[in-house]
Amino acid sequence: MSIHKDVKKITTNTLQKMKAAGEKISMITAYDFSFAQIFDAAGIDVILVGDSASNVMAGHETTLPITLDQMIYHASSVVRGVNRSLVVVDMPFGSYQGNSKEALGSAIRIMKETGGHSIKLEGGEEVVESVKRIVSTGIPVMGHLGLTPQSIYKFGTYTVRAKEEAEAEKLKRDALILQEAGCFALVLEKIPASLAKMVSESLQIPTIGIGAGPHCDGQVLVMHDMLGINVEFKPRFLRQYLNLHEQITGAVQQYIRDVKSNDFPNEKEQY
Ligand code: KIV
């Protein structure tokens, strides 16, 4: 029996049941109405309005510049396209790190102004007070450990995290702390598969991996990477399901030729 097929709306409880039943959770990013509508109708479990919008939508080098207002714009567009998937909205850099009051204020704005179903924030012990305060108001929180792109200037590189014992131990501790604080799920980004396995097995809440191997309870990919819109980015963990960059380039070049040669519009394409 598939839990995912049986439910009309995916909730945080559904994800919990999927973990308990050993049914994997599918998650993809989206940033606008049209793609969210396609992904939701295709049957994706979770849509993440990632702050990767800063990279793939706005063209910034990092996720740091995107603002709370911009995230709210993307998330409210996504929510209008969704009937069934659970929508998770990333809290952008600077909207929650100050203190737990500020974090709660930002989370409330996201929930009120977007209609999203939950929020995600990066970090472990450092953000636990914020997680507790947000969860206590009834807002579901997804955690994010491992490679946390909002800390890129601290890391200095996008390579695999927690290969060393000390960082791996901290990650395991942080995962338990976040679960204890009330997170309903955790993203594990770019960590060794063996560590992700240990963490996934030690937690009651589901883990969603990206570059964290096959033992997580679910997987997430950035839509521009898996659809081959962004072809420059080719990390080992990525499976590219389409080459939309090539297909779109071909279609646009054909359109240009058709316009220039007076082939478009033809008699049937006019009034
Ligand atoms: O912003 C994002 O797209 C993310 C995923 C990589 C998990 O946080």
Image: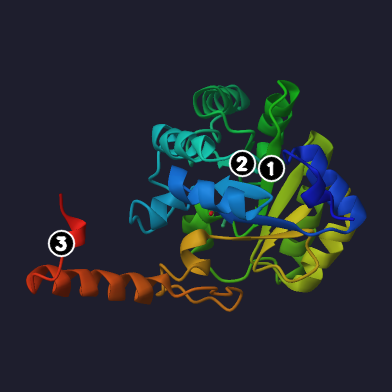
Work out whether mark 2 precedes mark 3 in sequence or the reverse, and give the earlier one: 2
Q: How crowded is mark 2: few (under 14 residues within 10 Å), some or many (20 or more)?
A: many
Up-down relation of residue 58 to residue 98 (above or below): below
Residue toward you, 57 or 255 = 255
Q: Do the residues labelled 1 and 2 touch (CB within 8 Å)?
A: yes
Residue 148 at x, y percent in the picture: 58, 55
Mark 1 is on which residue type? Met
**In the figure, is residue 30 to the left or right of 144?**
left
Tell me the SS state at disc 3: helix
Tell me the SS state at disc 2: strand
* Residue found at x 84% / y 45%: 16
Residue 126 at x, y percent in the picture: 66, 41
Q: How crowded is mark 1: few (under 14 residues within 10 Å), some or many (20 or more)?
A: many
Which residue is label 3 attached to? 267
Marks 2 and 3 sit apart, C-alpha to C-alpha, by 47 Å
Up-down relation of residue 245 to residue 177 (above or below): below
**Quarter holding residue 166:** bottom right
Q: Is residue 170 visible?
A: no
